[in-house]
Image (spheres, helix red, strand yellow):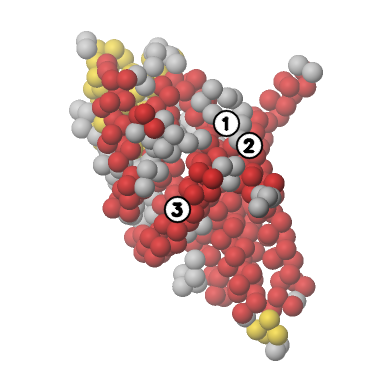
Amino acid sequence: MERLASDLLFNPTEEHRMLRQMVADFAAREVEPQAALHDHKGELNVPLFRRLGDLGLLGITIPEADGGAGMDAVAAVIVHHELAKYDPGFTLAYLAHSMLFVNNFYHCSNAEQRSRYLPRVLSGEWVAGMGMTEPGAGTDVLGMGTTAVRDGDGWVLNGTKTYITNGCEGHCFLVYAKVEGRITAFVVDRDCPGFRTSNHIDKLGMRASTMSELIFEDCKVPCANVLGEVGSGLTHMMRNLEIERTTLAAMSVGIADRCVDIMVRYAEERHAFRQSINRFGQIQRYLADGYAMTEAAKCLVYNVARDIGPDVRNRVGSDAAKLFAAPVGKQVADYAMQVMGGAGYCKEFPVERLWRDAKLLEIGGGTIEAHQKNLTKDLTALLARG
């Protein structure tokens, strides 16, 4: 039977289709039942996180020869899309580990470093994260103040990173610091002398993933933990931001997808004035507009993902995808809450949690204002080149 063009966009190969079905089944069976509890507790479900390792998802973009799944950015989008339907906070922990650490680490590490870290981060034995944002430097990454100074056979790091996902559970972090003004990437383990993390930073949404500061006070890091060349960190960072932003956009699509499903079902089942509330024009607007917005965001995100890879730069596409998709998750969750009325506002139903979770996607991984700035700059440069 001939496949629809839209299906070819979302599931370009049979392998992608099988991946989607596996993750969707896992998410409905194992992620959904624990989501509300871990949101309430503000804790990452570490045993469930390690199940992602059992399924081969923690190295989704890593070549099979090195223990990964050997798949592409579209596959990464599929996983984030399907997981986020049920627990965006848990999905954020997955993104920080698999995209911000594992994917980034792989493409700027050497064989010796991979042999030390990949087996343990791909299995989930070690939870990982990435440290870029600082108390005084977020979008302005060049303004970071964390420094690294060579000292004998190692490096000494000083500074603080903040709002770091997986900070509480993480064993290893990809950390950016300046060496004589040049941004350089290091892997810092929890047992490095002079390294500690703050208490958990409580937050509005995405509560099933934790957040803390990473604090370096004369922190000693071995020379073997420098990733790539000294001063090459900015290149690594910019390359990885593209898949990060696209998978964050996919999370927003997942939130919107779930909210559309919830409100369509609720509007059919809920009766007022002796008829289903989906007979009323005000409700029809939320259902129809929410669906159209979700489908538009979904198509953009999957289309952009086809043109992202370790050797393919696509900042215009990834910025556009996140700029457009991030507000969609929040807006469609808001529509669903409005359709459900008081029920939508109560914790008995998942909409209020999805609504809280959605806001982070307009901030994390680049604010919508940063995407607007990047797109204006890049589109103007493209215009100048003809």
Q: Which residue is mark 3?
A: 22
Q: Looking at the image, which residue is at 72% across and 63% down?
A: 288
Task: Using the image, tell me which numbered label, if any, was put on residue 308.
Answer: 1
119 relative to 330 in the view: left or right: left
For disc 2, the neighbor class at 10 Å (few under 14, some 14 to 19, many from 20) is many
Residue flagged by tag 1: what amino acid is it? Ile
- Under circle 1, the secondary element is loop
Q: What percent of the width, then of the height, locates residue 19? A: 48, 48
Nearer to me, 7 or 23: 7
Tell me how far mark 1 sits from mark 2, CA to CA. Answer: 7 Å
As drawn, the residue found furthest toward the bottom would be 274
Residue flagged by tag 2: what amino acid is it? Val
Residue flagged by tag 3: what amino acid is it? Met
Quadrant of the rendered image containing residue 277 = bottom right
Quadrant of the rendered image containing residue 336 = bottom right
For disc 1, the neighbor class at 10 Å (few under 14, some 14 to 19, many from 20) is many
Nearer to me, 202 or 80: 80
Q: Earlier in the sequence, mark 3 or mark 1?
A: 3
Residue 271 in view of the camera: yes
Task: Using the image, tell me which numbered label, if any, was put on residue 304.
Answer: 2
- Under circle 3, the secondary element is helix
Nearer to me, 134 or 106: 106
Q: What percent of the width, then of the height, locates residue 324? A: 66, 44
Count of numbered circles on the image: 3
Q: Earlier in the sequence, mark 3 or mark 2?
A: 3
Q: What percent of the width, then of the height, locates residue 1? A: 66, 52
